[in-house]
Image: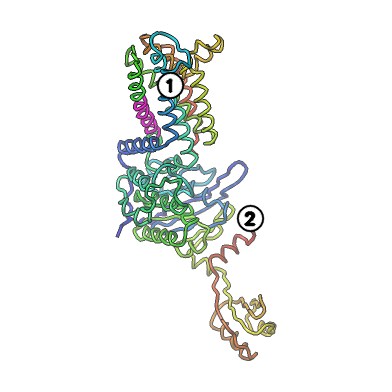
Amino acid sequence: MTSYSPAPGAAPVGRMLLAQTAFETKMLLRNGEQLLLTVVIPTVLLVLFSAVDVVSVDGPGKRVDFLAPGLLALAVMSTAFTGQAIGTGFERRYGVLKRLGASPLPRWALLTAKTGCVLITEVLQVALLSVIALTLGWSPHGNLPAVVGLLVLGTAAFSGLGLLMAGTLRAEATLAAANLVFILLLLAGGVVVPLSKFPSGVRSALELLPISALSDGLRSVLQYGAGIPWSDLGILGVWAVLGLGAAARFFRWE
Amino acid sequence: MHADPAVEVTGLVKRYGDKTAVDGLDLTVRRGAITAVLGPNGAGKTTTIETCEGYRRPDAGTVRVLGLDPVADARQLRPRVGVMLQSGGVYAGARAVEMLRHTARLHADPLDVDTLVERLGLDSCGRTSYRRLSGGQQQRLALAMAVVGRPELVFLDEPTAGLDPQARRATWDLVRDLRRDGVSVVVTTHHMDEAEQLADRVAIVDRGRVIAEGSPEELCRDGAESSLHFEGPAGLDLGSLLKVLPDGSSVAEPRPGTYRIEAPLDPQLLATVTAWCASSGVMPEKLTVQRRSLEDVFLDLTGRDLRS
């Protein structure tokens, strides 16, 4: 016969963190819509636009040399912003965040686990897209630390904005808005359409978007072999501070 | 066993905008007992429980759970308290057993997951995701998640709402086993029979206050007039019966041939009634004594009208 005699206690925080990260990642990878967003769309765009001349590209090298950095930026946005906003919005709606609030898992550990889950997914995305791009003849330049720095800061900026949306809007509104923003930024953020195609006034506004800073920064390193793209990193840094700050201030758990 | 209470709520007030959900509520929950918080919808049960769980800050009054402040001492308290929300709390895509296993991993010394799964019949959920489980399966999973960490105190918010009779029994049996092993249990419900069967103590909440508290027996006895019923020929002369009954009694014929006598119940009353029947040449059929149920007490206290 089972005894229910009390023996309360939290698991060691490292074990909780590991368990939560693994569980969140498992839930994400099982979600078909999320995979469409994070894997299928960037892959299809990369393959399609590399092969077919429907968008005119910019700069030196082959079409894939322009497209690959943009789609890496899109991958980061799809996971850190769109996927995280929608996922977290529904977790809030279904009381998952509320129930976890009563568990021994501290809130900072939950957010760390979410970040861990985003980073794991991004590693998988970057690996997949890089392999596909390389088979399409991609020849990237540049230094790895600059690329990693851009990806990390881009993740921070998009996570802040995604969590802000998830923690303030209704889940359905988040779903609609996050998808809309994804499409708008895909088209107007220098991902597949060069910003040089836009009129100059519009262009200087678009250049301040986090997606433009990320795709431009990645492109200047990977396509042009530039050093460290400080201005892009600066823009991403500002977005990260604003987004994470606002999320911390306005996020509602229920 | 500790002498101090598991939960002590004093003068709790909680407002949402200009609506007062809890209005000076006092509640003491004994250790190692099952306490039912009973009340109509909107009485303030869930708000009270969620304040004890640390989800809401009191606007006034104090709440102590296991001697601690649920908001300020949340970190210490959380592992010691099991929580079952009224609904939700599970990832939409999660399967029952993996969710329970994950919850167990957050605790130092959890119950054996397989045993708990079998006991609550969650093994039948298989690979079905949470959102496709039946309401009863979702409820049982939430219950399992509340107890898997081996807490000292469990809050169950309407744990049997929407359950079929078998699942309801299974829930009650588990709650009784928790008490047997020294766990304190607080359960909200609006099922009278649940409170009557399960609880050691009942607190009836209405309009944000506790309006009656005690064991189910005490509540049913307090000020309770039991009634005597019998059937016989229609249209008996009740005036002559009333004359022989003690002062303050009442007699009615709610349906032709069905009689109801309300009076303090003792053997003498039975003797008086049967003697009157004998002298009137009436054979009382189906002579029964009806004790007041908790439902009667509840309806007397909270009113019989539907509330919007």
Q: Which residue is mark 2?
A: B307
- Residue A192 in picture, x, y percent from top left: 46, 18
Question: Which of pointers 2 and 1 indicates the residue nearer the eye?
Answer: 1
Tell me: residue B191, above or below residue A235: below
Mark 1 — on which chain does it sit?
A: A
What secondary structure is found at the residue carrying circle 1?
A: helix
The residue at the point 46 percent across, 65 percent down is: B197
Tell me: residue B237, above or below residue A65: below
Would you say B240 lies left or right of A134 here? right
Magenta residues (range): A110-125
As shown in the figure, which amino acid type bears the numbered disc 2? Arg
Which quarter of the figure has residue B200?
Answer: bottom left
**Image quadrant for the N terminus of chain B?**
bottom left
Few, some or many C-alpha atoms within 10 Å of disc 2 (few <14, some 14-19, many ≥20)?
few
Q: Is residue A156 visible?
A: no
Q: Is residue A192 magenta?
A: no
Mark 2 — on which chain does it sit?
A: B
- Between residue A154 and residue B30, name the one nearer to us: A154
Looking at the magenta stretch, what is its main secondary structure?
helix
- Between residue A176 and residue B286, name the one nearer to us: A176
Question: Residue pushed farthest front?
Answer: A52
- Residue A66 in picture, x, y percent from top left: 41, 14
- Residue A168 in picture, x, y percent from top left: 52, 33
- Residue B136 in picture, x, y percent from top left: 45, 54
Q: Is residue A112 magenta?
A: yes
Would you say A97 lies left or right of B295 here? left
Question: Marks 2 and 1, how far apart in space?
Answer: 62 Å
Q: Which residue is mark 1?
A: A48
- Between residue B152 and residue A75, name the one nearer to us: A75
- Between residue B33 and residue B72, name the one nearer to us: B33
Which quarter of the figure has residue A139?
Answer: top left
